Image (cartoon, rainbow, N blue to C red):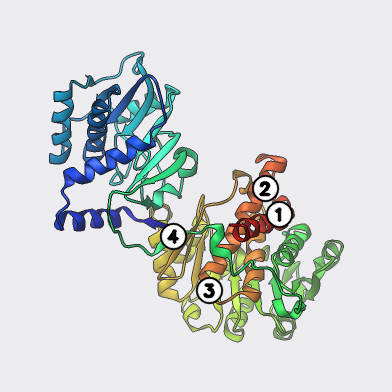
Amino acid sequence: MIELYSPSEIRAAEIFAMENGVSEIELMRRAAEGILQALPKTDGAIGILCGKGNNAGDGYALAHLLSLNGRTAILYRFSEKLTPAAAHYYELCKTDGVPERVSLEDNPFPDCSLLVDCLFGTGFHGEVASPFREVIEAANESRLPIVAADIPSGLSAESGLGTVAIRAVKNVAIGGYKYGHFLGRARDLCGELTVCDIGLAPLSDAAVVEDSDLYSLLAPRPHHCHKGTYGTVTLLGGSLPYSGAPRLSALAAASLRSGCGIARLALPACIANAALPYLLEGTLCPMPCRDGRLIYDEEALETAFQGAASGAIGMGMGRSDDNAEILRWVLENLSIPLVIDADGLNTLAEMDLSILSKTKCNVVLTPHPKEFSRLSGIPMNEVLAHPVASARSFAAEHGCTVLLKGTSTVVADGTDVLFVSRGSGGMATAGSGDVLSGVIAALLAWSQEDLLLTVAAGAHICGIAGEIAAERVGTISQVASDTVSAIPDAILAIAGNIHTT
């Protein structure tokens, strides 16, 4: 796994280092050396965009090192506010005779073949104001390659969000990767990610999932096994307005493709016939319904979940007065891993959430930010600004696992946090969440030893399947069933990376 840190965790590690004899000037020198080593080869001058604070100081230290190495640097200085360490390196730059500019002209970077972004550090939040907005826009419009020091200026290191931000070809994360390197707009703006070790020892309980972390989950299966070995999944959802036979059948297919033994699709009887042509390997459990929607029927629910090792509920259910009774019965009577998605989440948001801490189910909630805001009561802007803290606190309070969807998926159980940074823009389409629920429920049917990792593995598999699908059909034409079709290839790709390294 790749360890991740919040900006405050990195800052705490810096303070600890300085309290134990490492000066801020030395930390800045180490950062500059790391940036220098990461710079691509170039024949022209290197323009260094300096703002304020220690991020600017990294730029001044870099300019000093470039000068010592006989390379040409040009300082673009847009603030006179300097920390003591930054002032130290700025004075060295003046001694070295590094040329300096304090404004942009019609042709702002005439002699530069590369830019280094040292405008803002990881403490930045909010919106970019003048003159920095114009500097960022000019740098992006120059079409010169840009290397970002720590994180592209304009992005929050907490959320990866920012309206105006540097578009880098390479990002040198100083001291360790931050949340913002994987969230929000980061994948579109960071470019190639690399880390610069400056000798810090930050503490973290968050990490990005890699293929190698799924070794035990995707190990080759023994010959001595049968369908019961890998469990039955019950997928409960659907309604006439969201008849979604292909969608719900894709869920069943996704479940079987993800390794469960039996996928049971429980949906309103009035749309059962529409689903039959799509169910070749899955089993069908028609449920009582009224006006095209599921109704509460205890006996039917017992039948639907009989022998199930895991379940998923909510996909395509629509709104109904019976939904709350159905969900309450499931939570009060089952003791299996249970994925709650879509209208299951909307239903839960209107219920007393204390039921989550009372249930015997291992509950997994899979909301997108708006659903999570509705469920948690946390304002949407706060969820987007602090997705890790929001998911972690809710999971801790209610004793569940939260999978918060986004550019990178955040999976939290109240203590630890896993990021999944795979997927394609083409997955932003109807049904993708339904496929994800099916995959997670399938994995949970036969792998519950590490529930947090198993849930994250479902998102990781779907993400890679989405990437493969995008290569086949393109992100514009990609639909959820394309992701389902690519699940076997995704699992083969992940397993191949694991077992050949």
Image quarter of residue 242: bottom right
Kind of residue sitting beneath label 4 = Ala
What is the distance, in whole Å, between disc 4 and disc 2 at their CAs?
24 Å
What is the distance, in whole Å, between disc 2 and disc 3 at their CAs?
27 Å
Q: Mark 1 points at which residue?
A: 489
Q: Earlier in the sequence, mark 2 or mark 3?
A: 3
Q: Earlier in the sequence, mark 4 or mark 2?
A: 4
Q: Residue at x 36, y 48 (%)?
A: 157
What is the distance, in whole Å, between disc 4 and disc 3 at their CAs?
15 Å
Kind of residue sitting beneath label 3 = Asp
160 left or right, relative to 51? right
Q: Name the residue under label 3.
A: 450
Crowd around label 3: few <14 · some 14–19 · many ≥20 (10 Å): few
Crowd around label 4: few <14 · some 14–19 · many ≥20 (10 Å): many
Crowd around label 2: few <14 · some 14–19 · many ≥20 (10 Å): many
Q: Which of marks 4 and 1 is nearer the N terminus?
A: 4
Q: Residue at x 62, y 82 (%)?
A: 329
What is the distance, in whole Å, between disc 4 and disc 1 at their CAs?
25 Å
Residue 207 numbered mark, or none:
4
Check if mark 4's residue and mark 3's residue have beta carbons within 8 Å: no
Q: Whole-percent x and y of residue 16?
A: 20, 58
Task: Tell me if I can see residue 377 in this picture.
Answer: no
Crowd around label 1: few <14 · some 14–19 · many ≥20 (10 Å): some
Kind of residue sitting beneath label 2 = Ile
Q: Name the residue under label 2.
A: 468
Residue 477 numbered mark, or none:
none
